[in-house]
Image: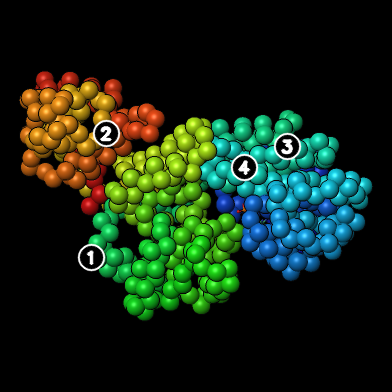
Amino acid sequence: MEAILKRYFGYSHFRAYQKEIIQKILDGRDCLVVMATGSGKSICYQIPPLVKGKTAVVISPLLSLMQDQVMSLKQRGIKADYLGSTQTNRSVSTDAEKGSLDILYMTPEKAYSLPPSFWTNLLNAGICLLAVDEAHCISEWGHNFRKEYKQLHVLRDVLVNIPFVALTATATEKVQSDIIGSLMMRDPYIVIGSFDRQNLFYGVKSCNRTTSFLEELVTEVSNYNANKSSTIIYCTTVKDTEQICDLLTNAGIRTGIYHGQMGSKAREESHRSFIRDEIHVMVATIAFGMGIDKPDVRCVIHYGCPKSLESYYQESGRCGRDGLPSICWLYYSRSDFAKADFYCSEAQNETQRKAIMQSFMAAQKYCFLPTCRRKFILGYFGEKSISDCGNCDNCKGTRKEKDLSRESVLLLSCIKSCGGRWGLNMPIDVLRGSRSRKILDNNYEELPLHGLGKDHPANWWKALGDLLIANDFLKENLRNEYRSVSVSLKGLQFLSTANTVHETPLVLAITP
Ligand code: ADP
Ligand code: ZN
């Protein structure tokens, strides 16, 4: 195994887990591998075929991903090829059937459409494993569910006694058990590596999408760019990518753009210029995604809150693959959080809708988080890290603290008085003294709190509401399409002491 690692990949040592995973696969055992991006999962399914002289079949979701992998494997002298869903390349499938390939990539659609004779021939020629890359796509609880992934178990009946290897960088416990169930894995060997990427700094800032903010962004990116290191800026819309790309280009920064509305040729060119350091900043939508293997990206900025914490972790994780210190910033504006319904509209059933909503709310919570960000992310993925990381904005204490007791009492009491069945808008309107139809219909103008919060604008109160949610004084409840907030147990406790002695001020960390 070591000799093969050295000969084909040029590395002298296996990284953590790699050797034991390869050994289990060689023993014929099913494996579930959950390890961070960049930790070296691919080698785990690339080495067994070289050891055994048999073919490995790899299911991969995207053509571009397969092409990249095949290209780099061929350069290493490994016989690799791929079968796309539409492509009918006789020579590739003939080669494969004869067993003359080491590694054969294909999309799930392709796997279903191949005739049984293909698999029989391949079995006779020798196949040593079936790998399912990006395996989180199997689960409706994953952040990238693909229905074509759900049928993969049909290959089980064809490939009896061939080990199945599922690999992913992000899987909560729920997703892990979905993967195992869906692929009908038998007593799988499970490796959950740490998700922690210690070299990455995590930070969040709120922004208001104004010109002055964009100027600030340009200055910041110019600073990062001073030593010509690579940065990716993820935007939530094509329009944003264009705007920011123009601004940076005008500021003299070599900037490229990448989004789904560009032709495939233009996208490839843009990607290539980035890999070759001809451009330093890539402004992109999430179409610039899986399969980007540039080890020295120093900074990933998200302009707009991503649709899930999983996708945030995966996208931000594209920096610092070489292990050197790198930075992940997330800029959110409150309007980002109105997109939940839009994301939910992609759902095909109730389970999916709930899953989308939950992970979006986790991303939102991440934005407002007052405590260690790494601890929160790792905890979300089921990893209970012991101490604060010291390498995020909250640990480094770049946030200010403020006593917001008085205002918190007002908002919490008002939410309680309104029965905890509204979103934030209604109680805030009450505090601000509105006499709208809805308020009069509910007799809320008679509440003693009515009008007591006039001294702050509605947005200020909303921001406080978000902080109180993030600090668990308020809880968000999901009912059908509708999100309401109510006072949590912690909030009620705070209210009861606040009304009597008011001895513990409510100090909250706020973004400068
Ligand atoms: P993942 O699929 O987990 O995101 P990759 O398989 O793409 O990670 O590997 C990330 C990088 O680490 C690649 O550049 C790969 O060549 C390199 N790598 C993998 N295994 C080793 C090893 N044992 N020693 C050194 N580098 C390795
Ligand atoms: Zn921290």
| Residue type for callout 2 | Gly
Instruction: Determine whether label 3 and label 1 are within 8 Å by CB.
Output: no
- First in residue order: circle 4 vs circle 2: 4
Instruction: Determine whether label 4 and label 3 are within 8 Å by CB.
Output: no
Q: In the drawing, does residue 138 fall left or right of residue 31?
A: left
Q: Nearer the viewer, mark 1 or mark 2?
A: 2
Identified at 64% across, 36% down, the residue is: 179
- First in residue order: circle 1 vs circle 4: 4
For marks 3 and 1, give the CA distance: 53 Å
Q: Residue 375: x and y, percent?
A: 42, 40
The image's mark for residue 147 is 4
Residue picked out by circle 2:
423
- First in residue order: circle 3 vs circle 2: 3
For marks 1 and 4, give the CA distance: 43 Å
Instruction: Determine whether label 3 and label 2 are within 8 Å by CB.
Output: no
Instruction: Determine whether label 4 and label 2 are within 8 Å by CB.
Output: no
- The local secondary structure at tag 4 comes to helix
Residue picked out by circle 3:
153
Q: In the drawing, does residue 388 fall left or right of residue 42?
A: left
For marks 1 and 2, give the CA distance: 31 Å
Q: Residue 21: x and y, percent?
A: 72, 43
Whether residue 118 is situated above or below residue 350 in the rendered picture: below
Q: Residues within 10 Å of mark 2 (few under 14, many from 20)?
A: some
For marks 4 and 3, give the CA distance: 13 Å
- The local secondary structure at tag 1 comes to helix
Q: Residues within 10 Å of mark 3 (few under 14, many from 20)?
A: some
Is any part of residue 283 visible from this angle? yes
- Indicate yes or no: mark 4 CB to ligand 1 under 8 Å: no
Whether residue 470 is situated above or below residue 16 in the rendered picture: above
For marks 4 and 2, give the CA distance: 34 Å
Residue picked out by circle 1:
212
